């Protein structure tokens, strides 16, 4: 998430004269930071529920991510619709505290681990009868 914050801070420096190569680098840093989050969130949700509820937990995480993405696009589109060149840096700067807050809250969440008896078995292990 630190890469995500760094990328958003870099994007907050955008101006109409920003070089295209710098823009590509800023988006690359942000993309790598954002790209690391979904699988960690999904794994954390799966480990926080009983084995029988893993499918439901996965669905909730995926649904929340989809709704959040749609909401984010709508909000950014509304905020930037009037004058993109003049306000894009400020918009990314305004989002950065929310990412930092999310990182802090995720760090403070109670860490849980699944007991060995509740671990899902692989297909190969499931086909071997227990002795």
Image (tube, rainbow, N blue to C red):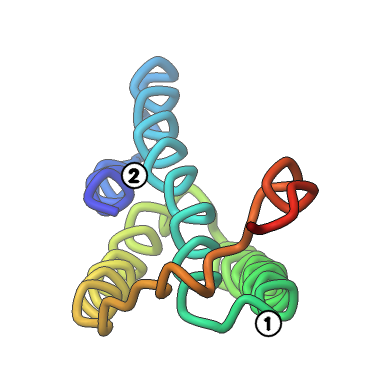
Identify the image quadrant of the N terminus: bottom left
Closer-to-camera residue (18/49): 49
- Residue 41 pos. (x, y %): 47, 64
- Say whether residue 44 is left or right of residue 18: right
Q: How far across and how far down the image is residue 19, in percent?
A: 37, 20
Pointer 2 or 1: first along the chain: 2
For image coordinates 52% across by 52% down, the residue present is 39
Q: Which residue is mark 1?
A: 53
Residue most extreme to the front: 131
Q: Secondary structure at mark 2?
A: helix
Determine which of the numbered discs, if any, sits on residue 11 in the image.
2
Of 82 and 3, which appears nearest the observer?
A: 3
Is residue 104 left or right of 41 when viewed as pictured? left
List x then y, in percent, for residue 64: 65, 77
One can see residue 65 in this view: yes
Q: Residue at x 36, y 29 (%)?
A: 17
Q: Quadrant of residue 99?
A: bottom left
Of tags 2 and 1, which is closer to the observer?
Answer: 1
Q: Is residue 111 left or right of residue 32?
A: left
| Callout 1 secondary element | helix
**The C terminus appears in which quarter of the rendering?**
bottom right
Q: Is residue 78 visible?
A: no
Q: Position of residue 77 (x, y in %)?
A: 65, 65
Label 2 and label 1: CA atoms lie apart by 39 Å
- As displayed, is residue 131 above or below residue 100? above
């Amino acid at each position: 998430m630190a890469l995500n914050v760094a990328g958003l801070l870099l994007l907050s420096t955008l101006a109409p004269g920003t070089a295209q190569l710098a823009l590509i680098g800023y988006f690359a840093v942000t993309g790598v930071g954002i790209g690391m989050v979904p699988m960690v969130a999904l794994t954390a949700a799966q480990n926080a529920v009983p084995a029988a509820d893993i499918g439901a937990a996965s669905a909730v995480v995926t649904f929340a991510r989809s709704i959040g993405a749609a909401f984010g696009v709508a909000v950014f589109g509304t905020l930037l619709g009037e004058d993109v060149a003049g306000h894009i840096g400020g918009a990314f700067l305004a989002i950065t505290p929310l990412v930092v807050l999310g990182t802090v809250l995720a760090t403070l969440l109670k860490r849980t681990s699944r007991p060995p008896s509740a671990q899902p078995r692989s297909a190969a292990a499931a086909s071997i009868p227990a002795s």
